Image (spheres, rainbow, N blue to C red):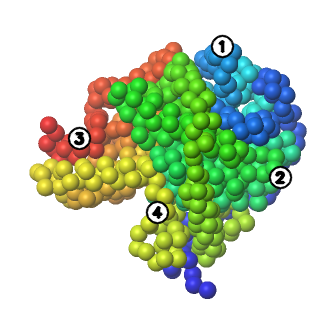
Amino acid sequence: MSRILDQTNREYLASLIPEDIPDWKESWQWGYEAGKEIQIEETPFMKKYGVKSEAEYRLREAAAGRMTWQVNMGLASVDDEVTGLKELETFNQETGLKISFCHQLPKNIVGTPKDKRQGIPTGVGFELNEYEDWHRIAHASTIQPIFGDNHLGYPNSVETTINCLKAGCKYQGMFCMFHQVAPGCPDEIWNMNEVIKAVGICAAKHDEDVIIASNMDDGLPAYCMDLASYLAYAKWERYVVEDLCKARYAMSFGNLTSDLIQKASMWLAASDTFSKDDQPGIEFIYPNTVDHWDHHLHSNYGFQIPEGLMVTLVERKYKTGASFLAVPISEKVAIPTVPEMLDMQGALQRTAESAPYYEKLINWDVVEETRDRIKEFSEVMFQNFMTGMKEAGIDITNPIEMMVVLKKMDPTKFEQLFHPSIVQEGKERVEPVLPAALWSFSEKMALEIINDLKDTEYAENIKGKSVCVASGDLHYFGLYVMTRVLEALGADVLYGGNSLDAVDVLDLADEYGVDTLCVSLHNGQALGYAQLLKQLAEERGREYHFYLGGLLTSFIHEDDETPSDVTANIEEMGLRTSTSVEELVKMLAGQKE
């Protein structure tokens, strides 16, 4: 039997295997015993609908062919969050429409244990500090909150999981977020150990329908060129959560997907793979966010409303129990207000009323054929991955070991080493079954910039220039475009990857003697991140040339309800900012116009 990996790649993966890993089964058992002691309170949502869990409600709605709807909400404080949930409830009462779930978006530091938060730049959202905060949100209205982001998957998993469960919320975290960099928590073995404890807590509540959720677009698959690779990776997550740790698992995806036929096919493939008789295999479907405009915002209704109709039609026919997580038209440029959330919900749910007319016209053959192709492909890629890990000496019975290796591994290697077009077909480059929309969009953007600049004086002046590039958060494709363009124009690029803390960016630059640093920022931490860069640079006594870009927003005052553009604040500190990769190239070339 031929090997999956050559010697070089086996040695590469083997070099990532951590030492001194604690006994994961003891950690899991600790969590399991702790979980048995937790009493899960009944929420107003469960009382209203007469169900014991969110899963039971979803299956009941699915049996009737009804889509369930949810929103994202991450306001400035717990008080605001409670008020927002009450507004959602009032909307339901006034309209007769039904928002069932509200995905919570707290600050990033919620995922960091309290004793490790000192000096960490914080993103947008609200803070959760005491159990009462979770309880207030869970019992604010008959809308069921789901605590996903910055919960299970992060180093503070034990505290957040316990508090979620006690408050009455049975969907737990975003398991895929173990792949993100948790601020203030550099010890990856300890980080993953805490996650496994939390998985053990959830395993103890298996029979009470507690489900560990995961959103592929927030983890390693966000780096994939092929949408079909998502399912292969999710199968590995399911293997860890269900097969090794005896808990429940459900997958989510969608915001990097614009082709509705591909999205429907992927949805059905994942549902077939992960669904059980007593739980849906999909937690939510996220709408396309790749094609959002940052201008003429009302035009953004134009592609999400057809998507809402499509997902309604899929659910009416296939009855998966998935929820659609609608995104307001303003999401690309600002934190949406509650009225903006309600506007999109009203538009989508009223559009869904016309589904019975459209379903008579639809032939689902192409969706089902693509679904079956994805399922077959994903199993081959999953087996490639499992076999390759074993070849590299990775213990595939140890979730902590596998998680640390994946965290340390260049995430683009997942496809480069295990994609069937590489392994089975011998191609030199990945040939996607379903090209991921954001990757296609980013590649197109990069090529346009390269073509515009390649024969200019800017390109000539940037050749050979040493530049360190990194992202301060999970967002990868802005970093991809920046790296692709700079390399194509002849710059010497030191690639730092995503989710780097400020200190890590400087450490990397210092290690390789690079003094020009370009950092992409999106999650509302721009001002704090910039201040920390400046402080660390002064402490080191070195002169750096900083260029910050992306979405440069932050809360400036404690009582701010929405973040502000902090571009001017950053410029006043002596750090440069750019609004586009093209502008960045001109600045680096010393010829900004």
When the figure is inspected, residue 423 is found, relative to residue 211, above or below; the finding is below
Which of 70 and 111 lies nearest the eye of the viewer?
70
The residue positioned 13% from the left and 55% from the top of the image is: 455
Number of residues whose C-alpha sits closer than 10 Å to that of mark 2, classed few (under 14), some (14–19) or many (20 or more): some
Name the residue beneath numbered marker 1. Answer: 94
Q: Residue furthest left?
A: 457
Callout 4 secondary element? loop
Callout 3 amino acid: Glu
Q: CA distance from mark 1 to mark 2?
A: 48 Å
Give the residue pinned by disc 4. 432
Assess disc 1: are there few (<14), some (14-19) or many (≥20) residues with their C-alpha within 10 Å of its C-alpha.
few
**Circle 2: element type:** helix
Which label number is shown at residue 433? none
Numbered mark located on residue 29 in the image:
2
In percent of width and height, residue 271 lies at 68, 51
Residue 573 position by quadrant: top left
Task: Confirm whether residue 163 shows in the render.
Answer: yes
Image coordinates for residue 296, horizontal then vertical, percent: 35, 26
